Each structure stands twice: as structure tokens, then as C-alpha cells.
Amino acid sequence: MKTFPLLLSALVLSSALSLEAAPQDAMQNEVSPPAGKIYQSLFWIADSRKMDAFLSNYQPEELHAGSYKGEVLPDTRVAWRDYAREAIKLARQGRNAEAAGRLAQMLKLAAVYRSFGGLQNVVQGEEIRHLAGLTAERLGSPVTALIQSPYLEKDASDCLLSIEAQIGDEKRHITSAFWRHLEKGAVDSHYRLTGNSKAVAQVP
């Protein structure tokens, strides 16, 4: 499952190339609206400490404040990779509850991207969950048993329903192979985060 980071990069690159291909058209169209509140907040976050501050003050009702249709939230992988490293370090120190807390923060951040909606945002949310799942699998049940998060669904099927709902109409623009890959990644991550890693290999 190393292809998840490549998915977002490919989507972003595709968007960039399409803009470069028609600069004259872009100049003739209206100027893009300013980024929304959540985008502006995330744009400046470069580590887990700043992300903690953002997540503690995050208000779901402000999710789309000032945003425009099709807005893509910034890439915050530096911060969520910090979370994974911190979880591993804490687990090695025997601080399993704190390690589980780092993974829970990753799930909360992933929920921000997923809830914002749109293909690229949902994909980045799944990338975050993917890394959280791999980290959980590495740390095992002493940590996964302690993860407390309202963003960790009880059933993998709930993940799939959420993904489909948040991608919305953009689903018709992606291939069936891409969709199957996205679904499998979501299910695998759920199993890993719930301490059921053995089920990952059984998912077709």
C-alpha cells in the first residue's frame, strides 16, 4: 500500500498541468476567490505542535467558512508524519496511552480533510489514516486497544459510506480501479487501527 502518497501527488500534478496548459484562458476568467478559513489555518502548520493547537480550536461548523467549491486543502504531511514518529517514540518509552493519543490526533486531522469533501481532500485524509494504520500495526495491541477517537468507525463499511458521500459527484471522474484501490486502502487502515491486522491480507 505504498501508492497512497502517489495518488495525491498525481492528482495535484494533473491540476497543475491543466492550469499551465491554458494560461490565456486562466487570465480571461475571473480571479479565484481567496482561500477559506481552514485552508489559511492549515497552510502555516509545519509540525505536530502547531497542529495540536489547530485541532484543539477547530470548530466543525466553521469547516467551509470562506471556502469555495472545489477548494483543495494544503498538504500537511510534515505534521502528520510527526505524529507517527511521536507515537513510535512514546510506545518505546512504555507510554502507550500517549502513543494512542498521537494516533487519535491523526484520525481527527484525517476527518477534517474527509469532511471538507472533494476527491483530493478525501484522498489526503485517507493518506493520513493509512500512515496511522501502518503505525498502529507496528505498535500492536498495547497501543491500538487504547485508541479513543470518535473518528474511528466501529465497522469498515462505515468508512466506505463516508468516503463515497464526501467525494460526491467527483466519483464519476475517476476509474473503477482507482475507486477499488481507495476502498481497499480505507478498509485496510480501519483493520490496522482496530488491531485486526490479520484481516488486511484477507481483503480482496
Image: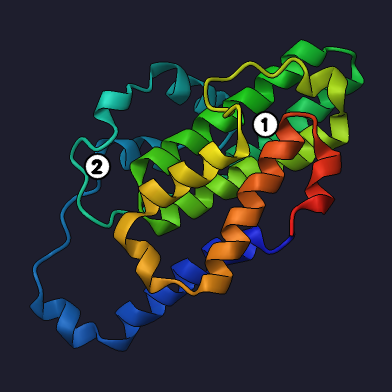
The x, y position of residue 189, in whole percent, is: 68, 43
Q: In the rendered structure, find residue 83 and report the number of the disc placed on it.
A: 1
Q: Residue at x 58, y 72 (%)?
A: 177
Q: Residue at x 75, y 20 (%)?
A: 99
Q: Amino acid at mark 2?
A: Gly
**Circle count:** 2
Label 2 packing within 10 angstroms: few (<14), some (14-19), many (20+) = some
> Which residue is tagged 2?
36
* Precedes in sequence: disc 2 or disc 1: 2
Q: Amino acid at mark 1?
A: Tyr
Q: Residue at x 68, y 35 (%)?
A: 82
Residue 19, located in which quarter of the rendered image?
bottom left
The x, y position of residue 196, in whole percent, is: 80, 34
Residue 30, located in which quarter of the rendered image?
bottom left
Residue 12, located in which quarter of the rendered image?
bottom left
- Name the foreground residue: 74 vs 164: 164
Colouring method of the image = rainbow
- Quarter holding the N terminus is bottom right
Q: In this orientation, does residue 176 appear?
A: yes
- Residue at disc 2, secondary structure: loop
Q: Is residue 68 left or right of residue 95?
A: left
- Residue at disc 1, secondary structure: helix
- Name the foreground residue: 167 vs 102: 167
The residues tagged by marks 2 and 1 sit, at their Cα atoms, a distance apart of 25 Å
Q: In the rendered structure, find residue 47 and report the number of the disc placed on it.
A: none
Tag 2 near tag 1, CB within 8 Å:
no
Label 1 packing within 10 angstroms: few (<14), some (14-19), many (20+) = many
- Name the foreground residue: 98 vs 130: 130
Q: Residue at x 78, y 33 (%)?
A: 136
Q: In this orientation, does residue 132 appear?
A: no
The x, y position of residue 77, in whole percent, is: 59, 46
